[in-house]
Image (cartoon, rainbow, N blue to C red):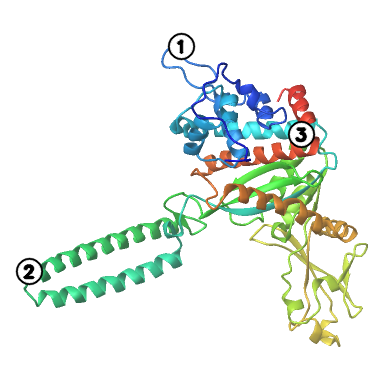
Amino acid sequence: MGQFVEGASRNQAALLPECLEDFIAEDNPVRIVDELDLASMGFEGTTPAITGRPSYHPAVLLKLYIYGYLNRVQSSRRLERECQRNVELMWLTGRLAPDFKTIAEFRRSNGAGIRNVCRRFVMICRDLKLFTQAIVAIDSSKFKAVNSRDNNFTPNKIAKRQEQIEQSIQRYLDALETADRTQSAEVEAKTERLREKIETLREQMRDLDRAGELLNDLPEKQVSLTDPVLVGYNVQVAVDTRHHLIVTLEVTNVGSDRTQLSPMAKAARDAMGKRKIKALADRGYFSAPEIKACDDAGIAAMVPKTQTSGAKADGRFDRADFIYIASDDQYLCPAGQRATYRYTSLESANLLETHTYWSSACPRCPLKSQCTPADYRRIRRWEHEAVLEAMQHRLDRQLDAMTIRRRTVEHVFGTLKHWMGSTHFQTRGLGHVAAEMSLHVLAYNLKRVIRILGFADAMRAMKLTGA
């Protein structure tokens, strides 16, 4: 081969076998995985049975999964193959090579333990003083479930599919009637196939009828046959704005974010070990009761108000054009008139107590055409409106709050989805998916800590904290 670098002969015998330790560099992340102390985390099988065949220790299987998720190898079958050929995994597991069923069963049966390990690593980050700013950005993203759209049904999809089946049945019936007028042997065989197709379509109609009955009992009016959730999951995370570490996560099958702000913010506060924190979120999280719940818990929420004003869209005065005078409990309108308190009502939809104001000068006001088409411009004020006004004041003082939110949390979802590939999850069911997402978050946080502290300091921290 001339001047090229040549490899060793495959038939060359070694007098002394190589040591696995020699193949693992001192700064290899697998060494940090090996330092994780995984005892008493809620795993099954930590105490082996006296009789029966020995099992694998949960720590071995968990380290195998953490290594896999660090290196974008999430499939149990691929992990089985890697155990047999990957030198790093041979070093990590001591040359153990569990079969894929054992590997998959561990993830399926130890969801609580896996989530505990993820929470424990966040506590390690807290002990390392990585959450000093006490500011989190909260956001969500949709992740595809192990489900196809063809196995997901809504009332509209059922009606459309039933219409298509009825048309197909009628077409086959017409063909069957034509075939009955001919008595050749070939037509008899075709007639039998047509009857089978018609029966198959009628069975599909019965399945759709059953799916429609299920939808009547579900508030979300949607049912899936493969994975009993939506076509995807709504994954909520809270991310530290300084180091971009994921502080807490929650996997839900609720498509809206309206009710998620206070639960996520409280969970983030507890995980960071703080009494008070700031929580940044986008307009999708704006909900007056949720913001009040955050305020009661010592959390300063910063969420832009949703733009739902029909008056502004029509070119009339917006609610923001009316100035509240707290000392008099009145509103000052753009025409300089006072809108006084009239009555209190309770909104039945969300049980919000609101006060209603209007001015007696509305019918004679020269600006009425710019204000309201009704006789009076009614202004409604929530009983805890001061909480929303205080939040708006915080947003006005920190104009870059939403920019910080965006650059903190959105790239996290992009990174996780890039690691996952086109098929986001390997498991089915909310509990199993939550455990799988915890493995992704643990791998993400572990990589972030290594980058923040450097390998040597991260290794030392794992040893000192008894991770």
Q: CA distance from mark 2 to mark 1?
A: 70 Å
Is residue 145 found left or right of 326 in the rendered image? left
Residue 106 appears anywhere in the view = no
What residue is disc 1 on? 50
Q: Position of residue 243 (x, y in %)?
A: 79, 43
Is residue 214 found left or right of 287 in the rendered image? left
Question: 166 or 192, which is in the foreground?
Answer: 192
**Amino acid type of the residue that numbered disc 3 sits on in the rendered structure:** Cys
Q: Earlier in the sequence, mark 3 or mark 1?
A: 1
Q: Position of residue 120 (x, y in %)?
A: 69, 31
Residue drawn at 77 percent across, 77 percent down: 312
Secondary structure found at label 2: helix
Is residue 15 found left or right of 262 in the rendered image? left
Specify the label residue 180 is tagged with: none
**Amino acid type of the residue that numbered disc 2 sits on in the rendered structure:** Ala
Identify the image quadrant of residue 172.
bottom left
Asked if labels 1 and 3 touch by Cβ distance under 8 angstroms, the answer is no
What residue is disc 2 on? 185
Question: 106 or 186, which is in the foreground?
Answer: 186
Residue drawn at 35 percent across, 71 percent down: 164
Q: Position of residue 156 (x, y in %)?
A: 45, 67
Q: Please determine whether, in this image, residue 100 is positioned above or below residue 139.
A: above
Q: Please determine whether, in this image, residue 167 is positioned above or below residue 29.
A: below
